Amino acid sequence: MRDEELDAILSREQEIAPSSGFVASVMEAVSQQAGAPPPIPFPWWRALPGLAAVVIAAGVLLIAALASILKGAAAAPTAVELPCALAVTLEFAKATRAGWLVLALAISFVSVKLSTLFAANGRHH
């Protein structure tokens, strides 16, 4: 197709009209959305204490791990390497039974992801 032909096609003014029933279906969808109740807001005030507890627990764990690493570094004159720091952190997690916390978080994450997936699939059918 040459430029002249393309210009001729594009320069013609054609009235664009919606297909029959399109306007009615759009107006029906708009009226259904207008009649639907508003979505339920997330109860942030109820979730805030749990979120604060998680932040505080993570901070305490981080401070304890750093204190343990620094205590080990002060005893030995050599620099603390990453594998040693990781081992100290894992030992601290084992001593405080943080594995149960990680397991609970993993189960919660998987259950939320599965329910979101099922809800999204149910909405499309």
Image (tube, rainbow, N blue to C red):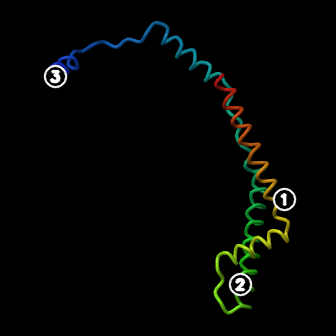
Q: CA distance from mark 3 to mark 1?
A: 70 Å
Tell me which numbered mark, 3 or 2, is placed earlier along the sequence.
3
Identify the residue under disc 3.
2
SS state under label 1: helix
Task: Please name the residue shown 57% across and 18% down the image.
Answer: 29
Q: Amino acid at mark 3?
A: Arg
Residue 100 lies, with reference to residue 5, above or below; the image says: below
Query: From the image, which quarter does the N terminus lie in?
Result: top left
Tell me which numbered mark, 2 or 1, is placed earlier along the sequence.
2
Mark 3, residues whose alpha carbon is within 10 Å: few (<14), some, or many (≥20)? few
Residue 7 lies, with reference to residue 66, above or below; the image says: above
Task: Please name the residue shown 72% across and 32% down the image.
Answer: 118
Q: Residue furthest top?
A: 20
Q: CA distance from mark 3 to mark 2?
A: 75 Å
Q: Residue furthest left?
A: 4
* Badge number at residue 100: 1
Q: CA distance from mark 2 to mark 1?
A: 26 Å
Identify the residue under disc 2.
70
